[in-house]
Amino acid sequence: MTRLLKDIPRRVLCPDNRNMNLGSRVATVYGVSVVDECLNPDCNQEGPLDALILGPLDRWPNIVVICGPEGCGMHWTLVGSPPIETTWIHIEEEE
């Protein structure tokens, strides 16, 4: 499923985004994937890099790329659709 992550968390705490005026939130991990490069345009660390797909899928952030110490660390962002290689592990109705 992933190269580095041994235990996939069920939920993660997402940071706030002051540019979008969004506070931090707890997101359910819907899936895992591997991307070819970091999605941060200021980083572009070459992969493969692990990524977690977060729910709900239409809300920022819906993906976090684990770039590591050689890159930007962790990049939280919103993508139009998850990577094709996504392995779906948990989808539930939002409360």
Image (cartoon, rainbow, N blue to C red):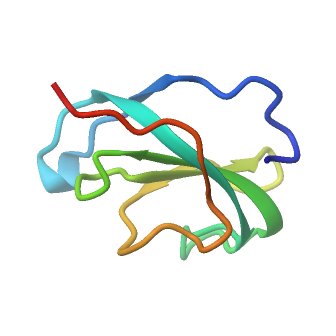
Q: Which of 94 and 51 is in front in this view?
A: 94
Above or below for 23 versus 59: above
Q: In this view, does 32 lie to the left or right of 19?
A: right
State the residue lying farthest toward the left. 21
- Work out which quarter of the rendered image holds the C terminus and state it: top left
- Left/right placement of residue 64 relative to residue 78 reads right
Residue 6 in the image, given as x and y percentages of width and height = 83, 28
Q: How many marks?
A: 0
Q: Where is residue 59 in the image (x, y as percent from the top left)?
A: 23, 52
Residue 7, compared with residue 76, is above or below; it is above
Tell me what residue is drawn at x 20 percent, y 55 percent: 19
Q: In this view of the protein, which residue sits in the foreground, 5 or 39?
A: 5
Q: Where is residue 14 in the image (x, y as percent from the top left)?
A: 38, 33
Q: Quadrant of residue 45?
A: bottom right
Residue for point 65% across, 69% down: 43
Residue beneath the point at 16% across and 55% down: 20
Q: In the image, is 18 to the left or to the right of 81?
A: left
What is the x, y in percent for residue 72? 66, 53
- Residue 73's quadrant in the figure? top right
91 or 33: nearer the viewer: 91
